[in-house]
Image (cartoon, rainbow, N blue to C red):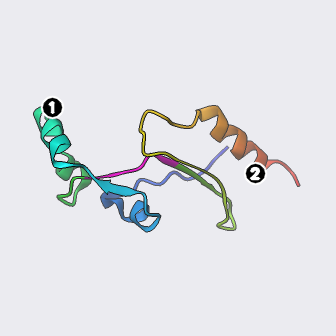
Amino acid sequence: MTYKVLRDLGNRVVEQYGLVFTLPEALQAIYAKFGIDLPKGNGDGTWRLPVPARFVIDREGIIRAVDADPDYTRRPEPAETVDVLKRLSAPR
């Protein structure tokens, strides 16, 4: 299977989906203590993070599957994504 994966520098796309938030100041300090320079990593000087999400969009631009959860510990299983992609690529 071949498909495109989006890398969203500056969180511009997730912002359009309403899936970005600014890290609270208390967490910014914790990140900094661990040497995590989120503003530098974002490339835009912000402390913003995307909500973990997976969108499967078909060739016509129709969203066929969505998983989004602000709890970063709950992620869709890779096998679920593969199943969605297989269904989309199956002959109709």
Residue under numbered circle 1: 34
Q: Which mark is residue 72?
A: none
Q: Position of residue 10 (x, y in %)?
A: 30, 60
In magenta, the rendered stretch is 48-53
Whether residue 41 sits left or right of residue 5 in the image: it is: left
User: Which amino acid type is marked by label 1?
Assistant: Phe
List x then y, in percent, for residue 70: 43, 45
Please report the residue visible at 47 percent of the width from the left and 54 percent of the height from the top: 6
Would residue 9 appear left or right of 32 to someone viewing this image? right
Q: For the residue marked with disc 2, what is the amino acid?
A: Leu
Q: Residue at x 13, y 35 (%)?
A: 35
Residue 82 position within the rendered picture, expressed as x and y whole percent measured from the top left: 67, 38
Instruction: Compare residues 41 and 76 and report the one nearer the observer.
Output: 76
Answer above or below: position of 33 versus 67: above
User: Which residue appears at 42% of the width and 57% of the height?
Assistant: 19
Q: Secondary structure at mark 2?
A: helix
Query: Where's the N terminus, which quadrant?
Result: top right
User: Between 88 and 65, which is closer to the camera in this rendering?
Assistant: 65
Judge whether 77 appears above or below 3 on screen. Answer: above
Can you tell which quarter of the image residue 57 is in?
A: bottom right
Per the picture, the main secondary structure of the magenta-coloured stretch is: strand
Q: Nearer the viewer, mark 2 or mark 1?
A: 1
| Mark 1, other Cα within 10 Å: few <14 / some 14–19 / many ≥20 | few
Q: Earlier in the sequence, mark 2 or mark 1?
A: 1
Judge from the rendering whether residue 34 lies leftward or rightward of residue 85; answer left or right.
left
- The residue carrying mark 2 is 88
Q: Secondary structure at mark 1?
A: loop
